[in-house]
Amino acid sequence: MKKIINDSSRVVDEMIEGFCFAHQELVKKIDDYRVIVSRDIENQVGLVSGGGSGHEPAHAGFVGEGMLSAAVCGEVFSSPTPDQVLEGIKASDNGQGVLLVVKNYTGDVLNFDMAKELAEMEDIAVETVLVDDDIAVEDSTYTAGKRGVAGTIFVHKILGAYARQGKTLKELKELGDDLVGRIKTIGVALTAATVPEVGKPGFNLKADELEYGVGIHGEPGYLRETLKTSKDIAKELVEKLSQSFTFKEDGQYGVLVNGLGATPLMEQYVFLNDVKKELAESNMQIAYTKVGNYMTSLDMAGLSLTIIEFSGTTEIAALNEEVTTPSWG
Amino acid sequence: MTLTTDETRQWLLEFSKRIQEQKQYLSDLDQAIGDGDHGSNMARGVTAVEDMIKDDSLTKPSEVMKKAAMAMISKVGGASGPLYGSAFLDMSKIIDEESLPEVVEAGLNAIKKRGKAELEDKTMVDMWGPVVEALKTDTLTQAFIEETMEATKPLKAKKGRASYLNERSIGHLDPGAVSSGYLFIAMIEEVGKND
Ligand SMILES: Nc1ncnc2c1ncn2[C@@H]1O[C@H](COP(=O)(O)OP(=O)(O)O)[C@@H](O)[C@H]1O
Ligand SMILES: [Mg+2]
């Protein structure tokens, strides 16, 4: 393992210290907790997210005016505990309640559920929006359901804008549930991530192999192949996505190319260029584009492609609104 | 017969010892069908349990069990933290009055309520369920617990991370069922010792 760290068990705490030092005008840490709170807690419904660490800049990088009120950081790739989430909820509540944006993993769901119950015992109204955009996993009653991945950042941004506009908790919950159903993501990995405390890669791919459908914690995907060109990868991922959307000719869509950690921006732009060509064949309109490392998986090489089907121009406007956060850009 | 405070404490300390001894093994089991952190998650939890139940001022089994629940809830994370935590918490509510089969059954029900898993979903329910039945018929032995661990091998996971693997989850032990097995082996060893 080759990493710039000190003690693998202290990585999360040391990262948080550094992060809060770098962005001290925007965020602060709650003492004794791994919770990062916006300095600008507005008079609105609070928006809290979080999950395992190792996905930076998610989620703490999206804390700030117009996006999240707080982010709760778990151990690397492991959900934060209920007491931590509860602190995030308490710090974000202004009497109008708090909306939790949770990626759909059993650990996250159970821990955030318990936090919700604890907060309700303290008379804070809490609702949850579950993000499950990863179409690599089949959604059936026989699995824990689809996973939440990069599409989560669209939920943060759009609901962040709506919360700023003064929407109520109930409205945000309904808008969020509807939004999540129109966001789909599929990833491809070239190498696995190495969790510092584990010290070795989570899975092994040969030097010339890639794997489609890998999750952001290294969950196995649906197909291994010999390395392809960007064009072929774009074709595969767009094809897979078009099976879960019926692209409408007059429909408006947004695209996110998300780097998983070790893939250069150069390659992400090359890939976006191919995605653009693939999508042109469906005659759909791309009304919004974003490229970069937003929901990473430590040092995994690879990327994911997210498509959102907009319900109307308000969602596009919500994505384009200015925010003051460390990492939205 | 209800448990004494000391038995409850010794039970949990023995559980902690076993988890720490098997930390790597539990993580290896989780690496095969999950994300490889069950051993470190559990070790973090039981270390906190030890710290919190050492306190001599705890005079009732329920106080010890509740401390253990809080430690698991606030230190483990992952799926197993809220599940063990909810189990211990509901066990603490009746442990002063009821005997072992009822106490463990309260834990089982808490796990099922929180995680919504049923028997044969390849989760810790596949340890807690059979153990409750065996306790009721007074047939619980270490051998039975070990067989029950093995019995999770052919199952296909329907809950938790392992469910992403579908058929590929078959042929591996469920890590949560194994760690729960250690809880019950520790129980056999420490509860009722002085009868
Ligand atoms: N819904 C559920 N109900 C009961 N037990 C579950 C459920 N989901 C997961 N588990 C148990 O949790 C164990 C995994 O725990 P752990 O690795 O600590 O958490 P995570 O899966 O979040 O990484 C599984 O082996 C299984 O026994
Ligand atoms: Mg695990």
Image: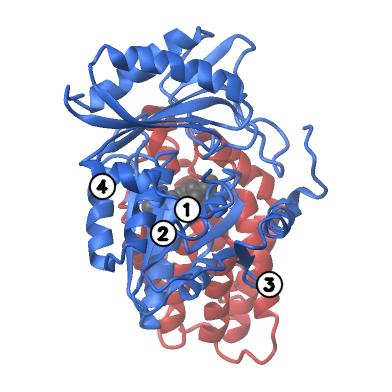
Chain colours: A blue, B red
Question: Which numbered tag is attached to residue A110?
Answer: 2
Query: What amino acid is at disc 4?
Result: Thr
What's under tag 1, amino acid-wise?
Answer: Val
Which of the pair A89/A18 is nearer the observer? A18
Q: Determine whether A326 is above or below A146 in the image.
A: below
**Image quadrant for the N terminus of chain B?**
bottom left
The answer to whether residue B65 is left or right of residue B136 is: right
Ligand 1 near label 2 (Cβ, under 8 Å)? yes
Q: Label 3, secondary structure: give it.
A: helix
| Residue occupied by mark 4 | A314
Seen at 57% across and 18% down, the residue is A267
Q: Is residue A226 visible?
A: yes
Q: Are marks 2 and 1 on the same chain?
A: yes
Q: Would you identify the image quadrant in which residue B67 lies? A: bottom right
Q: Mark 4: give few (<14), some (14-19) or many (20+) Cα within 10 Å.
A: few
Protein chain holding label 3: B
Q: Position of residue A273 (x, y in %)?
A: 45, 16
Identity, as a three-letter code, of the amino acid under mark 2: Leu
Residue contact between numbered discs 4 and 3, judged by CB atoms under 8 Å: no
Q: Are marks 3 and 1 on the same chain?
A: no
Disc marking residue B50? 3
> Residue beneath label 1, please?
A323
